[in-house]
Amino acid sequence: MEFKDYYKILGIEAEADLKAIKTAYRKLARKYHPDVSEEKDAENKFKDIAEAYAALKDPGKRAEYDELRKYGQHGQRFEPPPDWQPSGNHSGDFSDFFESIFGAGGPGARTGRQQHRETQFSFRGQDIETELPVFLEETISDKQKTISFQLPHYDSEGRRLADVKKTLNIKIPKGVTEGERIRLKGQGGPAIGNGQNGDLYLHIRLVPHPLYDVEGHNLIITVPIAPWEAILGTKIEVPTLSGNINLTLPANSQTGKRLRIKGKGLVSKTGVGDLYAVIKIVVPEQFDEETRQLWETLSNKTKFNPRSEWSKS
Amino acid sequence: MIETSLTIELTLKEVCEIAEVPAEVLITIVEEGILEPKGSSPDEWFFDIYMLNIARRASRLHRDFEIEWTGIPLYLDMIKELEKLRSENKLLKNRLNRFLLD
């Protein structure tokens, strides 16, 4: 177990008063709170911050911690002195380091994992939540997928052992969307004694696609076209999630023009979305001299001022 | 192969376990009108999976920032709005990048 320097975590001096502790906590909480933060690893950072605050805001706990701090250094291995007596109740789910100083939490504050430690009787296994990256292609029909995840493991006395890797072959229901959760009953943490297994929750994350942007149930694909295709119109083969289709590009199509391809978007509970092809005119990087001259002739013959709007005022 | 389910109804006990919210806190969240589960008494309550997230978030905001329960719905709305704007912003940036060269 690693020693945690709670003062360092909150960025304060060991002499800081309660007000300074509160101020430091609030500042860091606003920055790292998992409900608002975009910082990397915010959840774990906030756990440390909350734990440091829980230890230091209470003068009794702080005194105990200060006593132990004489023996430990941040990030280094640490065991409390053999005669150390954890002082008892607190509420919250904190690290082993915290619990070794202050003891395990009081009843009511505990959840799944800790319950196992307190009893040898039957207990329902822990519910597990894990993120499941899903490709857009996998959402348009019921799809089989093999997933692997880590499950916590306990011995018959409720002591935590090393995690176990579990692999499942599951069916992803068609129409899943970003952020959705699906439940696999009984596939979570193993039961203790005669309890039931916990459930597994899969938190769906749509993997960004190189071609398509997702807008609700609709998809957008950007279609590069040559200037002459834009002017003359053409037929384009457009890739969709379910194979290529032919699209007729009308003459005089501008950059930004949207063409709707009905029913080729994402599948949802309320129906099927559409695919929008958005035109983007692309210019070749090089021409041979003959082509360049043709463009020049064209330029001289065409009376077109794309900036006519500017000269109005 | 293992069947998966999208429509999920959770009991008070299940929400407390998964969201790591003490039962008395969840009851307060419902009493304050932040969540409206189906059913008339705590034994009969059913929550859907979106409520699970709200319960977790409401209890964290109350605990970590000491926000009064009456203020929580406002914060929840603002966070939801923030998330919506962030994801819209991400989409628009992606769209724009397909047209900009650098």
Image (spheres, coloured by chain):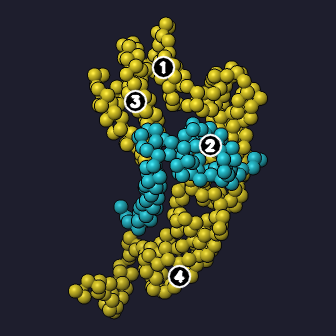
Chain colours: A yellow, B cyan
Q: Are marks 1 and 2 in contact (CB under 8 Å)?
A: no
Q: Secondary structure at mark 1?
A: helix
Residue at the (38%, 76%) spot, across then down: A288
Q: Is residue B41 visible?
A: yes
Is disc 4 in the same subunit as disc 1?
yes
Labels 3 and 4 share a subunit: yes
Residue type beneath disc 3: Tyr
| Residue drawn at the location 68% of the way across and 54% of the way down | B7
Q: Residues within 10 Å of mark 2 (few under 14, many from 20)?
A: many
For the residue marked with disc 1, what is the amino acid? Phe
Q: Nearer the viewer, residue A47 or A221?
A: A47
* Left or right: residue A263 compared with residue A210: right
Look at mark 2 in the image and give the residue it sits on.
B15
Residue A78: x and y, percent?
Answer: 46, 16
Q: Earlier in the sequence, mark 1 or mark 3?
A: 3
The Cα–Cα distance between marks 4 and 1, rounded to whole angstroms, is 71 Å
Residue identifier under label 1: A102
Please name the residue that numbered disc 3 is placed on. Answer: A53
Q: Residues within 10 Å of mark 4 (few under 14, many from 20)?
A: many
Front one among B99 and B12: B12
**Please, is residue A284 above or below residue A47 in the view?**
below
The location of residue A42, given as percent across then percent down, is 44, 40
Could you say whether the residue bearing mark 2 is in a helix, strand or loop? Answer: helix
**Which residue matches tag 4?**
A249
Mark 1–mark 3 Cα distance, whole angstroms, equals 14 Å
Instruction: Give the number of callouts.
Output: 4
Amino acid type at mark 2: Val
Amino acid of disc 4: Leu
- Label 1 crowd (10 A; few <14 / some 14-19 / many >=20): many
Mark 3 vs mark 4, foreground winner is 3
| B7 left or right, relative to A5 | right
